[in-house]
Amino acid sequence: MTTNPNIKIIVATHKQYRMPEDSIYLPLQVGAEGKTDSEGKPLDFGYQKDNTGDNISELNWCFGTQTALYWAWKNLSADYTGLVHYRRYFLSRKPGKNEDMYDCILSEKELLPLLEQYKVLVPKKRKYYIETIYSHYSHTLNGGKEQFDLAREIIAEKTPEYLNAFDSFMKQRSAYIFNMMIMDKALFDSYCSWLFEILFELFDRFDTTGMNDFDRRYAGRVSERLFNVWLHRQIESGVLKNADIKELPYIENVNWKNKAVGFLKAKFFHKKYGASF
């Protein structure tokens, strides 16, 4: 690791919200293109916007937080780049009772030793237990099965060396989700180059006619799973070792009761998710 590396962790947000004070965090307003305030002026939260430079801000309705990832890939030249969410952060430790979560968000001082030892930082895996990745996505999301099947078809055409990793991952019952990660520039560029080739092709082929706003944001959700496929392939090919990957605690704001009820309805009564929990 270089001395005093340039680290930028993008905080994807679509609203004004409290942000970490550490300088490694860069709040990024996603979906900024075309958004206006009550006076008809460009919506401005005082953050960097994702519609500057080389960008896909106008595709935020489908790509979600991945318009932030694309912006970082094309417009930053940091030694290490990461992506988090205004409601989800990597933590240095779990907050104690009545402790301010923001005091526990991973700081530059706490991050530097990790970067000396590991190559990829990820959130702790989400476990699904009674579902595989493929079945869970198919049961809970409108068009989910078709999106995964089409993604597999595209991977077979574009990057067939990833097909084994895709098939293997789809049978698993845990995954790194939320599109959260921190990596060095070489790995970050490799991941983004592969990912967006797949996502743009998927975007061109998958028809969202008749879908609501939640369902139309499928590209961001598919990419959560594709990150695992990419990571699996890096290990399979010897680019990374399991010991190069570090799982970190994270915080998320989620209604677990509603999420559990939503999952059970999807699993047993075929009622798809209609919103984020």
Image: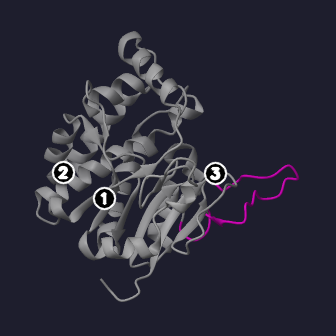
Judging by the rendered image, the residue that carries numbered circle 3 is: 14
Whether residue 36 is visible: yes
Residue occupying the far bottom of the picture? 3
Amino acid type, residue under disc 1 in the picture: Trp
Front label number (3 vs 2): 3
Nearer to the camera, 45 or 53: 45
- Residue 273, horizontal then vertical, whole percent: 48, 25
Q: SS of the residue at dot 1?
A: helix
Q: SS of the residue at dot 3?
A: loop
- Residue 210, horizontal then vertical, whole percent: 55, 25
Q: SS of the residue at dot 2?
A: helix
Judging by the rendered image, the residue that carries numbered circle 2 is: 162
The residue positioned 13% from the left and 45% from the top of the image is 164
- Residue 199, horizontal then vertical, whole percent: 39, 49
Q: CA distance from mark 3 to mark 1?
A: 26 Å
Nearer to the camera, 66 or 116: 116
Amino acid type, residue under disc 3 in the picture: His
Q: Quadrant of the N terminus?
A: bottom left
Which numbered disc flags the more N-terminal residue, 1 or 2?
A: 2
Which numbered disc flags the more N-terminal residue, 3 or 2?
A: 3
Residue 47 located left or right of residue 97:
right
Residue occupying the far top of the picture? 269
The segment highlighted magenta reads 31-54
Judging by the rendered image, the residue that carries numbered circle 1 is: 194
15 is higher (above) or lower (below) than 137: below
Q: Which corner quadrant of the image does residue 130 belong to?
A: top left
The residue positioned 38% from the left and 30% from the top of the image is 144
Q: Which corner quadrant of the image does residue 264 belong to?
A: top left
Kindly report the secondary structure that dominates the magenta region of the rendered protein. Answer: loop
